[in-house]
Image: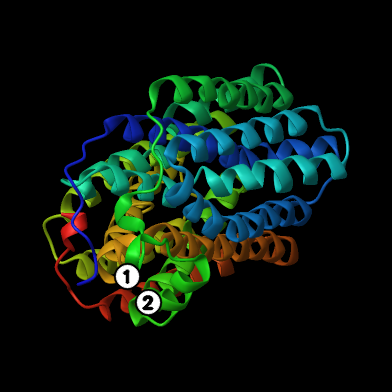
Amino acid sequence: MSDTPTLPSRQNWTVVIFGFLALSLAFSSRAALGLIMPVWQTEFGWTSSYISSVGAAALVVMAIVAPFAGRLVDRRGSQFTLNLGMGLLGVGCAIVALMGNKLMFVIGFAGFSAVGFGIVATHVVATAVTRNFSEHQGLATGIGTSGATGGQFLIVPLIAALLAFASWRWSFGALSVASLALIPCIRMSMKSDGPLEEDSGTGGTPSTMAQDLAVIVRQPAFHLLFWSFLICGFTTTGVIETHLLPFAAFCGFPPIPSATAYGLLSLVNLIGMIAAGWLTDRVNRPMLLAAIYLLRALTFILLGSLPGTSIEMLFLFAVLFGAVDYSTVPVTASLVASHVGIKMMGLAVGLISAGHAIGGALGAFAGGYLFTATQTYDLVWTGSVWLAVGAGFLALFLKAQPASKATT
């Protein structure tokens, strides 16, 4: 946009590194819910619907927290925001590790951990990278936010190994210790960065959250990105992150190979996010975003045919879906910066990420409800196909504006 300021040259790779590590732990903690779900069903007698509902509640909390987390990184900086999120996540995982009833599970996972998830999120890292980079932002954003999936390539199989050889309590305990241990590392290594001078409003007075919100919601591009990213949340965080591993168990695949396939999905996801970030700086971004969603729809057709096949088909799905999973993140972040504006990016991406979390909550709940009601995931995968197609068409309505000066 024309009111987007030109930022001085910035190349702060420390933000990229610790953003990657923080997202690795946060997203692995979320993935642990689906991995451990069958164990809790046996040990506590909890239903798939109940556990999915708690997961959905956590996503609703994330949706509420997301805009405030985006605003927080704008006003207090990357170091403070990431440390706060890691602290809440560490406490939440510790409560889950020690839980013995439903109340502790809700407090730990849908309470402390959920707020931590909302703060240690891709939109916070994407905003932090944008604030600290003036060149190659697409690539840097792709690398930093790829921690949402890439770190899981090692962490999720480790959680599965602890689950198999020790117990699920050790899995969450290890996640808690790792999250808390990252706090002093971030504090010592990442420089403190406050508000950018360019974030000030007219006359040097910072605009209020209400003022920025009023500007954001009047822009058609924001709504196209919001609703497409809500669908993105349904088809990734909701139905895949929560239900892929239980679906693999339903198909008769063992836990460790299934977790390894999930890890492979995460590795390919890392490559896909970095590649999408690289392409974001070079191609028509609305067309790129639409292509990602349409290709994702095709992968759900493959997933629906998985029952009765071999474990190799699960690995094939992991590779194909991983390439178009979170690759929407760097593209969407770039489109927000250019179509909405760098000045309001934290809040705008936070609102759009809230939509992603709402979609994820709907997907997590719908998956558990439909499976409990029908004892099959067929309706979940079929619905996901058409929703992904719809998101692709929404992306096509975006104008192919050139990246703003702040994002090139």
Residue that numbered label 1 is attached to: 340
Residue 138 vertical position relative to residue 377 in the rendered view, above or below: above
Residue that numbered label 2 is attached to: 224
Left or right, 289 with respect to 32, comes to left
Residue at the image position 61 percent from the left and 37 percent from the top? 32
Q: CA distance from mark 1 to mark 2?
A: 12 Å
Report helix, strand or loop for mark 1: loop
- Which picture quadrant has residue 33? top right
| Residue 369 - label | none
- Which picture quadrant has residue 52? bottom right
Tell me the kind of residue under disc 2: Leu
Nearest to the observer: residue 205 or residue 193 = 205
**Number of marks in the rendered image:** 2
First of labels 1, 2 by sequence position: 2
Residue 220 vertical position relative to residue 200 in the rendered view, above or below: below
Residue at the image position 41 percent from the left and 42 percent from the top? 194
- Which picture quadrant has residue 85? top right
User: Residue 181 at x, y = what percent?
Assistant: 56, 20
Residue at the image position 20 percent from the left and 70 percent from the top? 287
Residue at the image position 28 percent from the left and 42 percent from the top? 132
Quick one: quadrant of the N terminus? bottom left
Quick one: quadrant of the C terminus? bottom left
Tell me the kind of residue under disc 1: Val
